[in-house]
Amino acid sequence: MNEIFEEEASYGAKDGTQVKCFMAGPKDLGAHPAVIVIQEIWGLTDFIRDVSRLLGKEGYYTIAPHLYSRKDLIDLLTEENIVDAMRPMWSLPPEKRNDREAIAGIMAKMNDTQRKVAKILTSERASLEESLFSYISDAYAFIRKKRKVTKTGIVGFCMGGGLSFQASTMIPFDATVVFYGVNPKPIEAISKIKGEVLGIYAGEDEGINGGLPELLTNVVKHKVRFQLNFYPGTHHAFFNHSAMSYHKEAAELARAQMLSFFSRTLGGEKR
């Protein structure tokens, strides 16, 4: 493994926002592949920094953007506020999570901050994601300008898995790793993916896995270079060592598969 640098930095986005980010990678200034690391719903957490360091030690320049850096979001969408707002929402059984009456009942019991956060992350999610994709695109341009980059990949987890998958239909990544993320919308957009995709899914993840049949149908239809790894007996977020659903054995296997995939597709350290 390489000796790495670590840096809390920022980059300018098209909307004028200074997007905070964590960067890590080889200390030498030579040409290396780069990987953009996309956060879970909680934001730029220690877990995401740890993933960035892991990839940095394997020879990749990494950048993990704090996607809630916009002035109206940065003090509102904190990890603490998101936990307070979303845990009551996730207490609903899966079949009720799109039930407007059930959601209204939960939100009626929230305070103003919880309600505002919940709305942004649920009913206003599509609008939010427009800026998130823009910041991912800006991160892609920034890392390629700041460092000598050969090829570029992206990896994301949970919400970030879905964002990474969607971003790969919009940005010419050479490799994409999706940890239990939702399918791109519309699903036919996967025909625009340039590079290879590795999908890592938890066995006990009904909400995400319900989209796999449609995904695989379109992978075949559009001839996407796609590899699926499925972990029976694990739950959503099993890779996150700080989560209650962490599954050590599966996480170690997924880690090795991610590193092997990036090594083959981006040309990082040989494993």
Image (cartoon, helix red, strand yellow):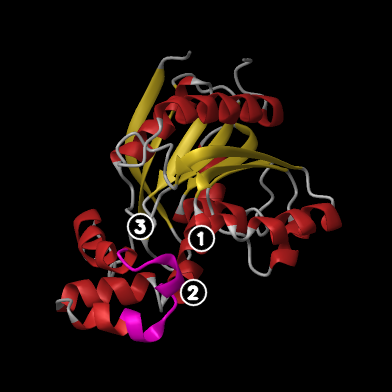
Label 2 – label 1 distance at C-alpha: 18 Å
In the image, what residue occupies the spot 33% across and 64% down?
90
Indicate the quadrant where residue 188 lies. Answer: bottom right
Nearer the observer, 60 or 228: 228
Q: Nearer the viewer, residue 99 or 142?
A: 99
Circle 3 packing at 10 Å, graded few (<14), some (14-19), many (20+), is: some
Q: Position of residue 123 (x, y in %)?
A: 41, 79
The residue tagged 1 is 207
Q: For residue 101: magenta?
A: yes
What kind of element bears circle 3?
A: strand
The image quarter containing residue 117 is bottom left
Asked if residue 29 can be seen in this view, the reply is: yes
Q: Magenta stretch: residue 185 in it?
A: no
What range of the chain is rendered magenta?
91-103
What label does residue 126 carry, if any? Answer: 2
Dot 1 amino acid type: Gly
Q: Which mark is drawn over residue 18?
A: 3
Q: Residues within 10 Å of mark 1 (few under 14, many from 20)?
A: some
Q: Of the residues under marks 1 and 3, which one precedes in the sequence?
A: 3
Q: Is residue 220 left or right of residue 48?
A: right
Asked if disc 1 and disc 3 are in contact, CB closer than 8 Å, the reply is no
Residue drawn at x 62%, y 30% as measured from the top left = 262
Q: Nearer the viewer, mark 2 or mark 3?
A: 2
Where residue 82 sits in the image (x, y, percent)?
26, 61
